[in-house]
Image (tube, rainbow, N blue to C red):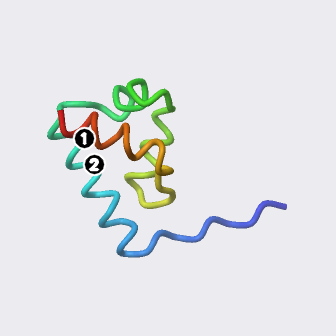
Amino acid sequence: MAEPKTPPTAEDRARGNRLAGFRRSAGLSQRQLGVVLGLSRSAVAQWEGGYSFPGTDVLVLLAATLSA
């Protein structure tokens, strides 16, 4: 049986909200950002919800994409 997911902390949610703000400022949907990064829309949604966070390899590409 799968263990239930731990709810995100306030810090996790704040980090996700900041990421969502940067994405929106770049004019990208979750799906579009996922395509650029070679990931799914649901991966981006998980980050923005604070349920997970991208690895360092993806963070580098994410920063380059959102700062352009």
Dot 1 corresponds to which residue?
A: 23
Query: What is the three-letter code of the residue carrying label 1?
Result: Arg
- Quadrant, the N terminus: bottom right
Secondary-structure class at tag 1: helix
Farthest residue toward the left?
Answer: 25
Task: Name which quarter of the figure residue 29 lies in.
Answer: top left
Query: What is the three-letter code of the residue carrying label 2?
Result: Ala
7 sits left or right of 22 in the view: right
Dot 2 corresponds to which residue?
A: 20
Cα separation between marks 1 and 2? 5 Å
User: Which residue is more in the foreground, 27 or 64?
Assistant: 64
50 sits left or right of 67 in the view: right
Q: Residue at the spot x=42%, y=24% of the render?
A: 35
Task: Name which quarter of the figure residue 9 lies in.
Answer: bottom left
Residue 19 location (% of width, % of height): 29, 51
Query: Do the residues bearing badges 1 and 2 touch, measured as CB atoms within 8 Å?
Result: yes
Residue 3 location (% of width, % of height): 74, 66
Residue 33 location (% of width, % of height): 35, 31
Secondary-structure class at tag 2: helix
